[in-house]
Image (cartoon, rainbow, N blue to C red):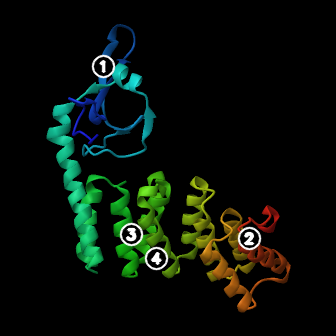
Amino acid sequence: MATQPHNAQDSHGKADVRGVFSTQEVRRVGTGTTTRKTVQKTFWFIEQNGKDIDCQPLNTNYIPSGPKRKITMDELIAKFSPEPEFYLNSVFPKMQEMQRNVDNGDTHREKGENFAAEYEYSRALKIDEENVRANFGIGLTYLERGDNAKAQDIFQRLVKLEATFEPEHKHLFNEFGINLRKSKMLQESLEYYNRALELSPNDENLYMNIARVLLELKDISQCVDYLLKALELAPRHETSLKFLAWLIQKQLVPADKLEGVRTALKMAQNGAAPKPKAAG
């Protein structure tokens, strides 16, 4: 069923919920005879996908921002009140404005118009400084023009946002990681991929990308270990196999790693995983 602009039903049944809701909290202020009650109202952006309902706070610009949490339909009905007019008049227009800025930034960046792209991304970040696409976009423009100091600031912001590592941003995640490495921001690149690894410990591509960084850091032993770990997870991972073959050809594999590498290459032919002990 198509997503509705706010909480709604159609003639075919219940629609997924999408819109702004509020909660109220009564607090007591003061002591003794001066005690009085205050009501604090908080606005939330609620979005339902199937059985999952995400609840996200609004920032001061009325944009959904910050960490999401899961709630149940029972919680939504019992604790939250719909705010359809506030959503349609205040929140939805701001979300559209930010989306336009990010889209314009992407268009300029794809054309190599980095300063125009930076302007559009900056406008989006004034509305929501935690917008992942805008942060990726402006970070990439900084890296592409060699402004590593500004890129470092964006990097520090991105690694703190769990949304950075969500599947929907995979393409931007990969592009940013590659550009960090090419810009010789190797320690940042290592931290970036290791943070992703904490959230996706079984992603063979992350191990292979870390291996690339370790090669540039001239830590060949660790580089080999991470490639073997990638192949433990995906024995026929083509990029890792080619990487190992190249290391052997260049005679870069440490003597104590040769047996493990040969075993991994042999196992790949049969599609069987190397033994875990091979990746130290």
Neighbours of disc 2 within 10 Å: few (<14), some (14-19), many (20+): few
**Up/down of 80 relative to 122, above or below:** above
Query: Residue 217, how many percent across, how many down?
Result: 64, 80
**Up/down of 4 relative to 227, above or below:** above
Q: Is residue 5 visible?
A: yes
Q: What is the CA distance from the residue labelled 1 to the residue labelled 4?
A: 51 Å
- Residue identifier under label 1: 38
**Up/down of 1 relative to 196, above or below:** above
Of mark 1 and mark 4, the one earlier in the sequence is: 1
Q: Secondary structure at mark 1?
A: strand
Tell me the kind of residue under disc 1: Thr
Q: Is residue 225 visible?
A: no
- In this rendering, which labeled residue sits more in front, label 3 or label 2? 2
- Residue identifier under label 4: 179
Residue occupying the point 58% across, 67% down: 205
| Image quadrant occupied by the N terminus | top left
The circle on residue 139 is: 3
